[in-house]
Image: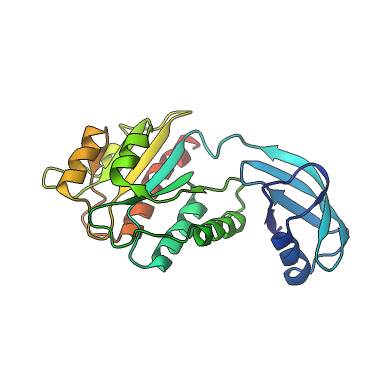
Amino acid sequence: MNLFYDPGAQSGLYELAADEAKHLIRVLRRRVGDQVRVVDGLGTTYDGHVQRIDRTSCTLDLRKSEEKATRSDYTITLALGPTKKSDRMEWLVEKATEIGFDKLQPVLCSHSERNKMRLDRLHRVAISAMKQSLQSHLPAIEPIVKFSEFLDRDTSDQKFIAYLGEDTDTTIKNLVHAYTPEAGQSVSLLIGPEGGFSADEADQAMAAGFVPVRLGPNRLRTETAALYALQCISMLQLSSQL
């Protein structure tokens, strides 16, 4: 079943958001009586059917079928320096959303090659990936902030920074077991831009409670490093369910 996204969705007769209605009518060619499923991006899923269709709008008859206050037992924030090419950032948002995370926080670092981002575009990519992977939580895409500002704001319970300093020999695979997220806790993964973090930035992060880790023996692109680290943390949730 195709998933539709509407942040204002509610039980009862409801007019679907214009963009989604256009997709339902013109692309999927749904008809009155067809079954539909709608999510609001905050964890609530609605099931129902098409009640009425005209050229530009669609009315649904919905009933709440599931409500999840949070995506999982803990939240994951990806904080990273934007990639030089925008398509690589879009790829990361798509794949990370499919795996499951809660917030993307771009940070402006000393080696960053971009200081602006198309947040609207990344938001649309995240919506598409959420729908494709049949999830009900949409990750937040935050405006870019300075590195020091992110450190001041971040209040996560567990913090990791991917850093290639000479004294960093612990891999995230070995460390995640010691830092297993418990219910209600939060995790931040700090990934550098294509030029990596400066030594001063690494020192600031560690002073703010970030634990330096390696992501394996290979040198990874920013988007690959972020996805690898996210998967390592996400595996904890899967293993806890087995």
Q: 173 and 192: which one is in front?
A: 192
Write the residue at 66% across / 46% down: 40
Tell me if residue 23 comes above or below residue 35 in the rendering: below
The answer, for residue 207, to whether it is visible in the render is yes
Write the residue at 82% across / 59% down: 58
Write the residue at 37% across / 47% down: 145
Side of 113 relative to 230 (left or right): left
Rendering colour mode = rainbow
The answer, for residue 169, to whether it is visible in the render is no
Number of callouts in the render? Answer: 0
Image location of residue 50, percent across then percent down: 84, 56
Image location of residue 242, percent across then percent down: 49, 37
Side of 199 relative to 125 (left or right): left
Q: 222 and 8: which one is in front?
A: 8
Choose top left, top right, bottom left or bottom right for residue 113.
Answer: bottom left
Q: Quadrant of the N terminus?
A: bottom right
Write the residue at 74% across / 68% down: 28
Image location of residue 215, percent across then percent down: 26, 50
Tell me if residue 71 comes above or below residue 129 in the rendering: above
Q: 150 and 27: which one is in front?
A: 150
